[in-house]
Image: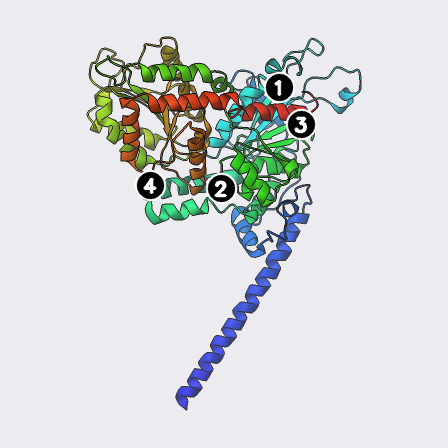
Amino acid sequence: MIFDAAWKDALLIVGIIVVGIIILFQLLKIHARNRYHRWLSTPSTPLDVDSFVNTDINPPNHTKIWFLQRLSVGNRQPTEEIISLSSFPSPHVEGLRVTQRASPRIGSNVSLVENGAAEMKFPDASQKKEGMAIPPSPLVIGTIRMGFGHHRIAYAACSWALSVDEDNPQKGIPAKTEKTGLNRTTYFHDLLNIDSEEADLIKATDETYSKMSRLTSNLGGYVEKMWGKAMLSGNADVLRISGLTAVHLRPLFRNLPLDTPIIATHCYVALAAVASGFTNVINLVIDNHAQWFVVVPGCLNLVQGPANYMNFLKMGVKPENLKFVGHWIPRDLHTHIEIDCQRRIQRAKAVVSTNDTSRKSPIRILVPVGGAGAQRKFIVKLVEALGPLVKEKKVHLFLNAGDHAHMKTALANTIENMGIFNANGDNTTTTASYEIVSTLDGVRNFRESLLSNPEAEPSSSITLFAFDEYFPAVATTDILVRVSDIMACKPSELAFYPIPKLMIRRVGDHEQYSAIRAAELGDGTFEVREVMECVQYIKTMIEGPEMLTFFNECIVKNYHIGIYDGCKEAVKIALEKAGEL
């Protein structure tokens, strides 16, 4: 009887606890739902994610949204502040202007650029009356530095924006009109460059992403698989959370006229612009995997591939919010596609002699490191495995360590452990050697020496590019594409580039679909996850010209049907919507 009574008491207590937990959970769900609707209404903005994703098909998980939004922004409330902006000439890209705060942030040690800084200029509404001379509409290319990809795409868009009037002389406004005497201005609007609480909010998110990418890539195994699957989970709730966060970023846009053409290379930029009330927003969708969180309501979402276009339509994105335009490619690479591919084919077909049909010229392999600095283990192992081919002068490696000091150190140590030492500018050495290039001028001179003389080869078997600054880290890969035979890279934004590509091990599972896109277009391989399989591909390219010839012929065919026209089309569409093309 005592035993029975004890169990009855225990069961009663357990039952009370279970009922209490259920009641608390229901109260939490009610609180989360109320908080979500309060967030949507304070402040009320034109951004309507729920209608965009269709709540009947994708109902919100209020508890998940409440928890993750609290984790992201805490108790912070969106403000109605207007951060005044100025701009200064880009130190890297001629004709481009970079945005910054117009005045220092109170309590901040960040210095503003003063040389060439000026107020941002936009056509005044009163100037648009009939008969009045008005300057051409400026273009704002909005981005966020999260890794290298978003910035790379933004600079690609800028390259077309800076030349749009030259490229469309019959339709566009001349770059400098006789009527107004004014140039069209292109602004590079990196939200992280605007010293503010809003930028601090973004930086915290970026730091977490970069750390997780590096950690999971190096650990591999189950941890890498879990992170990879997390990169595939960008559902409607993630878009809702991104939209709520983007409302906090509106002060970074509210200084600009609402009819300004905005080309966004990060979904936060497009979401913030729409939430601010802008009427001409173009969102350049990344990757080749359709997820809700990379598309944005209230704007035109441009995609790079037909599979993405079809999948977004199937998900429920309306046709008026979606268009397939092609890959995000810089103008310099685009305009030289045919000549560069022809040069690669000639190099691949040049053999030592009639008796020895192996390549006469070493195969040049460009290996870039991503902006998060992941893949260290894989790239180090790949360089080690290619060591014998490097020593035999069958391979030249162009290693871009970016601005990651740990990658520079790891690669330099790996190279020297292979018995390949720094030439220190000695061009007479007959053994395999390596050299380090650490300036953007050095990169440009390196490329020019190879472009100006088709018979020239680098003086060292391995060239390690490493920088202290961010821009050269991004730009170097784009500069070197034209003098490389193949690029060995993860299936990131570079998977869409017009160069033969060896698609090496991905960091997130979403990237695998970009490798599939490259392989189906014939300008790259499927993802190659093992180092020795990468080496076998390289050996195949050394032994005969067929694979590299095929890649380059496919690239030329793709070029003629507009596959690489994405950024060109984005700029054109933005100005058509502005009534200027």
Badge 2 amino acid: Thr
What separation in Å lies between label 4 and label 1 (alpha carbons)? Answer: 43 Å
Of callouts 4 and 2, which one flags the residue occurring earlier in the amino acid sequence? 2
Q: Is residue 420 left or right of residue 292?
A: left
Image quadrant holding the C terminus, namely top right
Badge 4 amino acid: Asn
What separation in Å lies between label 4 and label 2 (alpha carbons)? Answer: 20 Å
Percent position (x, y) of residue 50? 64, 48
Badge 3 amino acid: Thr
Q: Secondary structure at mark 1?
A: loop
Q: Nearer the viewer, residue 561 or 265?
A: 561
Could one spot residue 472 in this view of the protein? Answer: no
- Residue hosting label 3: 260
Of callouts 4 and 3, which one flags the residue occurring earlier in the amino acid sequence? 4
Residue 185: numbered disc: 1
Of callouts 2 and 1, which one flags the residue occurring earlier in the amino acid sequence? 1
What separation in Å lies between label 4 and label 3 (alpha carbons)? Answer: 43 Å
What separation in Å lies between label 2 and label 1 (alpha carbons)? Answer: 31 Å
Q: Secondary structure at mark 2?
A: helix
Which residue does the image show at 67% across and 11% down from the upper left? 177
Q: Is residue 383 left or right of residue 41?
A: left
